Amino acid sequence: MSYHVRRWRLHAMIERIPKSHRYRVTNLGLRTAGFFTRTYSRILRPGLEEYRAFPLQRPLRRSFDKPDQEAKSWVEQAKLAA
């Protein structure tokens, strides 16, 4: 845990409360957390639900499957066992 606390402090996500062993979240930390929360709830979660609901008919599914198909083709070209 101390590793993560140190990283958050160095990135100005949290700051130490003077003369204590406690930390508080900075404005940057709150904005960053809000950004990632909104990104997940507005973009990632609906996109993944669309991916699961219509597995063969959506462009998002094709976008997710393309890297997998490319990796399989590289393995076949190199004659490696998957």
Image (tube, rainbow, N blue to C red):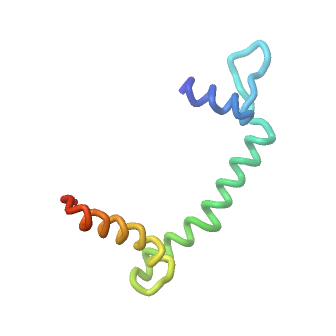
> Does 37 sit above or below residue 49?
above
Residue 79 falls in which quadrant of the image?
bottom left
Q: Taking 11 as reference, is 62 left or right?
A: left
Tell me where residue 29 appears, x and y as whole percent: 73, 41
Q: Taking 75 as reference, is 11 left or right?
A: right
Residue 43 falls in which quadrant of the image?
bottom right
Q: Residue furthest front?
A: 78
Tell me where residue 56 appears, x and y as whole percent: 39, 84
Residue 36 falls in which quadrant of the image?
bottom right
Image quarter in which the C terminus is found? bottom left
Tell me where residue 31 appears, x and y as whole percent: 76, 48
Residue drawn 43% across the image and 82% down it:
54
> Does 31 sit above or below residue 78?
above
Residue drawn 75% across the image and 44% down it:
30
Image quarter in which the N terminus is found? top right
Q: Taking 27 as reference, is 52 left or right?
A: left
> Does 50 sit above or below residue 80?
below
